[in-house]
Amino acid sequence: MRSACCSLRSSALVCVLFFTVCRVHAQGFVIDDAVAATARDLMDRAQSDNAAYEIVASLTTEVGPRLAGTESEARARQWAVQKLRAVGFANVREEAFQVPLWERGEERARILTPFPQPLTISALGGSAGTGSAGVRGEVVAFASIAALKKAPPGSLAGKIVFIDEVMARSRDGSGYAVAVGKRRLAAYEAARAGASAALIRSVGTSSHRFAHTGQMRRVTEAGEAGVPTAALSAPDADQLQRALSYDGPVEVEVVITPRQLPPVPSGNIVAEIVGRELPEEIVLLGAHLDSWDLGTGAVDDAAGVGIIVAAAKLLLDSLEQPPRRTVRIVLFGAEEVGLVGARAYAERHAASLGQHIVATESDFGAGDIWRFDTRFADAALPAGDAIGRVLAPLGIERGGNRASGGPDMKYLREAGVPVVGLLQDGSDYFDLHHTPDDTLDKIGENALDQNVAAYAAFVYLAAELDVDFR
Ligand SMILES: [Zn+2]
């Protein structure tokens, strides 16, 4: 097929130029020559474009930390509306919803006996407080959340639970899904066993002395509240473990004073490039605007905001006419505190989810993309493979067909919207994740350009090609 296709061309040079197209044809899906060439042109332009970094610098400097529901998250929405209008997107708007507001208070801990010294902690998002007097108790260590689940009800009365489960480092971040269980459930498993507070080894891979915060489940299905719960930095978890290795009890004090407040406004920010032929058909690019309060949320997820906005901007600046379908950017609010913006989007747009052709989110830092995953109907897989071949020169391999699409894609995916994952190298992502160390200096000036190239090519192809991914 390849040689037959190429024989139509008059010269070997042209044959080489159209190699990708010929291969696509050979495998059952033809990407039009001009379309493939435009995708490659977008990829080239992205390599010399610094727009994504400039967006990340602007958001992290002009807004800084932007915890869901706070005044600073509201300023991030204003920033986004202004920025997206200035770039020239259409239909820039806020879609408001309500979110419970959790505010961090004072937080400190120390070993009382046998080796008195301070410990570095950070309260988990949604945690109850200890009151300013704090709680004191003997530490009981568990190797995992599974081990704590086996503790009989009431057996830990007056004790402070310590879950010392280590998270594995990996390129695809798969260690997170396992490790996050202890963060989500420690508070109420500890409460069920009668403990008065819980400490967990941070869900993270760093050895620096920062604790990693993150959302915990606030109440059980039965509506039961958990105990005050905080993360220890990795070196402090090591220290506590060593203290426990001596004979005799280890007693600690934990003081955290967060407050859970009534719901307040949050919102998603939406912007579009309106499709020239099928404006009602949506190709959705997401990222989340909120961050944890400790750092400036540069890798989580200003990087994603920069990547998708710069990719869509590149289409706007480079194409002579808009693609056939609408490209919709969604900057989700309140992701960190439980995908509140994602749920609000899926509910508000329930009637049009059938016209969401494909969706994806950038929310895994600033590393290069190395794999292209899909979640398409079998019939659409040749088209997915063809798109994958266009992306291949960026060093991106074709992955499987079980993409999650990213955290904010959960409800769209569950509603049957096809999703893709442009998987970034996340080997060091969890060194910074949810810590005070998540700041702009961790991102190199041109580090995001490969991501922009991949997103720009993908979104253009998905919006231009006549493919139903369902
Ligand atoms: Zn994130």
Image (spheres, helix red, strand yellow):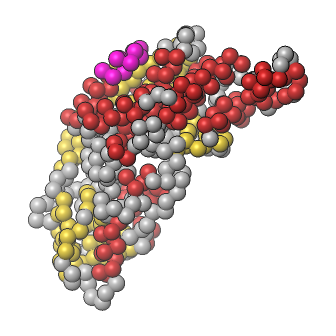
Give the quarter of the image for residue 192: bottom left
Q: Residue furthest left?
A: 133
Quarter holding the C terminus is: top right
Give the quarter of the image for residue 398: top right
Magenta highlight on residue 416:
no
Left or right: 257, with 141 as reference point: left
* Residue located at (37% from left, 47% from top): 442
Asked whether residue 404 is in view, the answer is no
Q: Is residue 330 above or below residue 205?
A: above
Q: Position of residue 326 (x, y in %)?
A: 52, 17
* Residue located at (57% from left, 27% from top): 44
Left or right: 241, with 391 as reference point: left
Q: Which of the pair 47/63 is nearer the observer?
A: 47
* Residue located at (15% from left, 56% from top): 106
Q: Is residue 343 above or below residue 119?
A: above
Query: For the magenta stretch, what is the residue range?
Result: 82-92
Give the quarter of the image for residue 110: bottom left
